[in-house]
Amino acid sequence: MAKAFKSKVDVGSVIVTKLDNHAKGDGVFSTTKSPIIFFGTSDYSDDFEIFKMKSFINKLFGMGDIHGLFEKIRRE
């Protein structure tokens, strides 16, 4: 499905609204070869963060994200 979509629409980047353990999402990224620019952090439509690979990996492995914490404090 992602390949058919990509053939009709020029995808420049991706906004991921839900990150969970679902293998189908992986296919979308490899097929479109598009970077993730934002990702959703909760079930609410206004909870998005700029996607930063290192911060995402740190959170994924439970190591925390000090830069993300500083950014959140700065915004509030």
Image: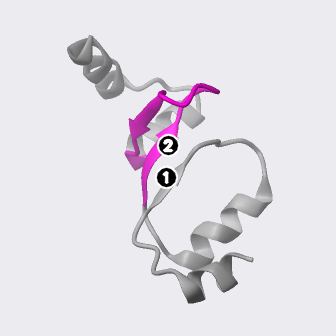
Is 63 placed left or right of 4 in the picture?
left
Find the magenta span and give its range: 36-53
Mark number displayed over residue 64: none
Q: Residue furthest toward the left?
A: 74
Residue 21: % across, % down: 77, 45
Q: How crowded is mark 2: few (under 14 residues within 10 Å), some or many (20 or more)?
A: some
| Residue where numbered disc 2 is placed | 39
Q: Is residue 28 magenta?
A: no
For the residues labelled 2 and 1, say whether their Cβ atoms are less than 8 Å apart. yes
Residue 63: % across, % down: 50, 26
Type of residue at label 1? Answer: Ile
Q: Residue furthest toward the front?
A: 8
Secondary structure of residue under mark 1: strand
| Residue where numbered disc 1 is placed | 15
The answer to which quarter of the image holds residue 45 is top right
Number of marks in the rendered image: 2
How far apart are the alpha carbons under marks 2 and 1? Answer: 6 Å
Secondary structure of residue under mark 2: strand
Residue 13: % across, % down: 42, 65
